[in-house]
Image: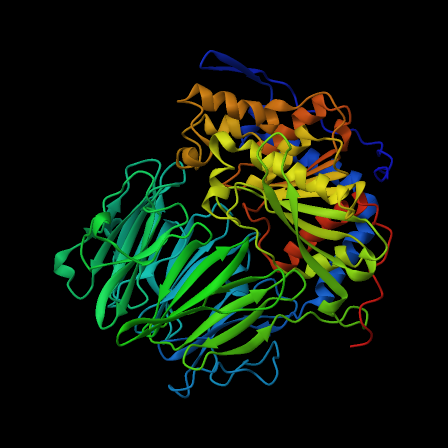
Amino acid sequence: MPQPALPPVPPVAPPVAQKRPLTREHHGRVRVDDYEWLRAKEDPAVIAHLEAENAYTEARTAHLADLRQTLFDEIKERTLETDLSVPTRNRGFWYYGRSFEGKEYGASCRVPVADPDDWTPPAPADVSPDQPALPGEQVLLDLNELAEGHDFFSLGGSAVSPDTTLLAYATDVVGDERYTVRVKDLTTGELLSDVIEGVMGGVTWDRDGTSFYYSTVDESWRPDKVWRHALGTAQSDDELVHHETDERFWTGVGRSRSDRFLVIESGAKTTTEYRFLDLDAPEQGWRVFAEREEGVEYSLEHAVIAGRDVFLVLHNGNGPDFEIATAPIAPTPRSEWVALIAHDPAVRLESVDAFAGHLVVHQRSGGLTQLRILELGDDGVGDDYLVRFDDELYTIGSGGNPAFDQPVVRLGYTTMRVPGSVYDYDVRTRELSLRKQSPVLPLDGRAYDPDDYEEHRLWAPSDAGEEAVLIPISIVVRKDARAAGPVPVHLYGYGSYEHSLDPWFSVARLSVLDRGAAFAVAHVRGGGEMGRRWYDDGKVLNKKNTFTDFVACARHLVDSGWAQPGRIVAEGGSAGGLLMGAVANLAPDLFAGIVASVPFVDNLTTMLDASLPLTVVEYDEWGNPEGDPEVFDYIASYAPYDNLRPVRYPPILAETSLNDTRVLYVEPAKWVARLREVAENGEDVLLKTEMSAGHGGVSGRYQAWHDRAFSLAWLLDRLGLASGPASGLASGPA
């Protein structure tokens, strides 16, 4: 089937960036870059060019204005706007978040625990936006008040002091992820005089509550220092606790769930090192648990097993998919770690959490997540089992479990058709209790029914030129759409940093599914879905596997009868945006359109400049093209910006943010400028820049819904579904 026709090009001409050649030479290879001048963010000519691109994008998508509004309205109508999260218990209080109809941001609240022996979270009979959700409610932070007067707002983290009387919270009102920490007295509601600027994320309280720890970044946006701040003193007097001088490593600080230890992690992509401070014996000072060893990653978790204090060490020293060992509370070389859960090449161990009566292990096998419980008794580790669900595709994980002595495990569960659900698993009784499933409200009077949809795991063969590799695909579609044969497909991918795109539910996605399209995720190499080897086979000098895997998945969807030829739209963001740029060069005729969000498309230039944010710490992911000519040639052979050619590309929507510190706006700006110059249809390439946002886009939820509606309207247009209404076959009146 031919691709949907593009609307007539409006009379406004696409912006054409001025060419200002810049010549660079590396390893005897000469690169001429005509658009590097767009990096000068403070240059009025650059801002004018970005604004001209925004105006052109608005003109080219003007015919979608009504659809954008319809999609926004559908997202809004399906969302319970006034709601609260399931309360989490810690130190005598139940903590929860609230959202309010008509407000961009939420609030964090708490109520006292009424019965210390009852771990059942309180639930409101009704939630009103102008009334307390629960009796005795205390509002800790009203984010709408904090965001007032700012175009952008982000809460980087918040932490209540161990005595529950103080709250340290971090805010960013620019989008550059450099936060300012303030401290609120929860008894009086007043702010203390302490103001800490330039913080990376949030803070970690010391056990006595009179000081806290935080991290700051260097000029290349690498968290390199850990500081201790004593309340009531100036930031200039803060104690430098640790300085990580190796530019490949970042550092951060935390406190054990048991409250006995503070830990500082120094981590690179493939190597870690931990320091710990025993708060029961602070005179011993900070000690390195095990010296860093190239290629060995480990983490520490304090546990008490059979009455003995130990460190649980999750490490890859005996195999790529990790094992869990025990070690004494002391500096301990790897040769003395004792295996508790041995390495298994079929199971990737990802984390372990210790509680007084049990251990919780997050792991994955066969491309799916698993939650594993190890019960603890007087004699040590007892029963070892999985918390099981019956769906073909799912994501399970624990979270919101701050108390060391809690007997229940709070866990989250979702599939591509089942909304996110919160359960409590009682380890004592092995009972699983559903506490909440994210509501999906009726649309036009029709209730949402997960049984109207089907989801499957498919396996696509990789390129025939290599040894057989099967690539997992997760796909969801309306049953009535699939019954009619092949469908248009929205295909998503990422494939970097061992990040796994485990199945997830999306209210906004329903507007695509209900118009007859399928949504699919290509779990390509470079991600972590199939274990550490899956990641290793998609990075550095194996990176091209990520791109060929995605193309193989798209072709498999067509060959297996799921997709219609010429009606697949691809999407990816950040490193997934690099994937989008690469597949556009690799198979430009395969896709009806490509959405590239904050795309890392000028990666050769970035990786050649060690002064840029994140470059040096990324060498283990992409390689060092400045120091290694082989790496230079390899990246140069696939970098999207460097490999554009005079062919007809699929229409492209590139989205970026001016204040992004992770993937700078200049990368998509240069990419689009060169596409306009080189591609046979450069007028079909659009650039949309948020002028007051960061890597995650705009900050308020209604703004975010409008942004997503913009992308989805363009995507539906490319799938030939812009004029069709959402399905009226939901399941009858609510």
Quadrant of the drawing holding the N terminus: top right
Q: Is residue 445 above or below residue 369?
A: below
Q: How is the image coloured?
A: rainbow
Question: Residue 360, position in %: x, y?
Answer: 40, 66
Residue in the foreground of this view, choosing between 470 and 576: 470
Q: Is residue 706 left or right of residue 131?
A: right
Residue 4: where, in percent of width, then height?
85, 40
Residue 580 sits above or below residue 122 on the image: above
Q: Is residue 112 above or below residue 609?
A: below
Give residue 469's position: percent from left, percent from top: 58, 40
Residue 603 in picture, x, y percent from top left: 53, 30
View extreme (left): residue: 283
The image quadrant that residue 269 belongs to is top left
Residue 109 vs residue 607, the one in the foreground: 607
In this rendering, the count of numbered labels is 0
Q: Name the image quarter holding residue 579.
A: top right
Would residue 577 be found to the left or right of residue 312 on screen?
right
Residue 600 visible in the displayed image? no
Is residue 88 visible in the rendered image? The answer is yes
Q: Quadrant of the C terminus?
A: bottom right
Front-lying residue, 182 or 375: 375
